[in-house]
Image: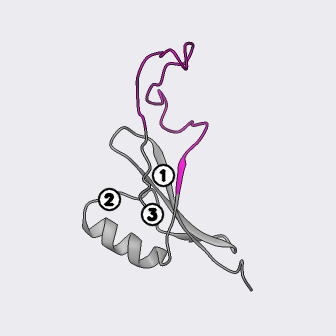
Amino acid sequence: ANSWLILNVGGGPTDDKPTVTLTTPPDPNRTSAFLNVRVADIARVYQEWSAKGAEFLTEPKDHGREIRAYIRDPDGHLIEVGQSTGILR
């Protein structure tokens, strides 16, 4: 309750991170990390988000313990959207 996620996409050093500068990835096909969003029904999310203009890299792919697909935010950051499967069986 009362929690949210903020993705900081840029900014210079601050007093609590004096040597760190945040930048958008220069090569969108090479990344060191990505946001992972878990959903209950990936097929429904894929359909709804696609209808609203989200551009997925591929359709959801079944990898056994999860079904997942990827999108990019407007700044080019990679986001995984996935549904866990078979974990509780």
> Image point 35% across, 57% down: which residue?
55
> Image point 47% across, 16% down: which residue?
14
User: Mark 3 or 1 closer to N-term?
Assistant: 3
The residue carrying mark 2 is 54
Question: What is the three-letter code of the residue carrying label 2?
Answer: Ala
On screen, 34 above or below 12?
Answer: below
Q: Residue furthest front?
A: 2
Q: Residue furthest right?
A: 89
On screen, 52 above or below 3?
Answer: below
The residue carrying mark 3 is 1
Tell me the element at label 3: loop
Question: What is the three-letter code of the residue carrying label 3?
Answer: Ala
On screen, 9 above or below 79?
Answer: above
Question: What is the three-letter code of the residue carrying label 1?
Answer: Ile
Segment tinted magenta in the rendering: 8-36
Q: Position of residue 16 (x, y in %)?
A: 54, 20
